Amino acid sequence: MSKPNRRDFFRDLLRQGAKTIAAFEQGREEARQKADRDAFFRSYESSYALTLCEDELLIESAQLAGIKTEGRDRLEIAKELFSRQEAI
């Protein structure tokens, strides 16, 4: 096995630095998206358009997605349905 030289060391250092920056940027973007999603569902008024659909349609869509609906309000159901659709 050959002895690593300075050129290889700096090349590897730059690669690792680029990977670290890319991972940081990805994490920052995911955090921003989560903050936006949380702000959207913070109140009924801000998510009004999503919760405006008829009860039957919302409940049926949630049940098709495997979401339990009993004892939950429309906002909670819509939030979970939205999260699952976003993950697809």
Image: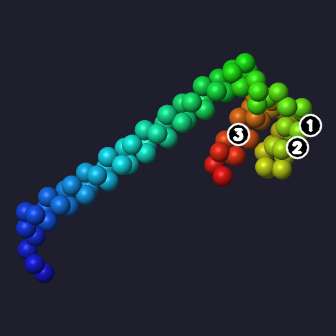
- In-image side of 52 versus 41 (left or right): right
Q: Residues within 10 Å of mark 1 (few under 14, many from 20)?
A: few
Residue on which disc 2 sits: 60
Q: Are marks 2 and 1 in contact (CB under 8 Å)?
A: yes
Check disc 2 and report its element: helix, strand or loop.
Answer: helix
What amino acid type is highlighted by mark number 1? Answer: Glu
Check disc 3 and report its element: helix, strand or loop.
Answer: helix
| Residue depicted at x 79% and y 50% | 66
Check disc 1 and report its element: helix, strand or loop.
Answer: helix
Task: Give how far across and how far down residue 34 sits, in percent.
Answer: 55, 35
- In-image side of 34 versus 46 (left or right): left
On residue 82, which mark appears?
A: 3
| For residue 77, above or below residue 24 | above
On residue 14, which mark appears?
A: none
Q: Residues within 10 Å of mark 3 (few under 14, many from 20)?
A: some
- Given residues 13 and 80, the one toward you in this image is 13
| For residue 17, above or below residue 11 | above
| Residue depicted at x 39% and y 43% | 25
Image quadrant of residue 61?
top right
Residue on which disc 1 sits: 56
- Given residues 43 and 73, the one toward you in this image is 43
Task: Give how far across and how far down residue 63 sits, in percent.
Answer: 84, 46
Compare marks 3 and 1 and give the one earlier in the sequence: 1
- In-image side of 14 versus 46 (left or right): left
Task: Give how far across and how far down residue 38 sits, in percent.
Answer: 60, 29
Task: Pick out the residue farthest to the right.
Answer: 56
Cα distance in 3D space between marks 2 and 1: 6 Å
| For residue 49, above or below residue 81 | above
What amino acid type is highlighted by mark number 2? Answer: Glu
Task: Give how far across and how far down residue 40 sits, in percent.
Answer: 64, 27
| Residue depicted at x 82% and y 27% | 52
Cα distance in 3D space between marks 3 and 1: 16 Å
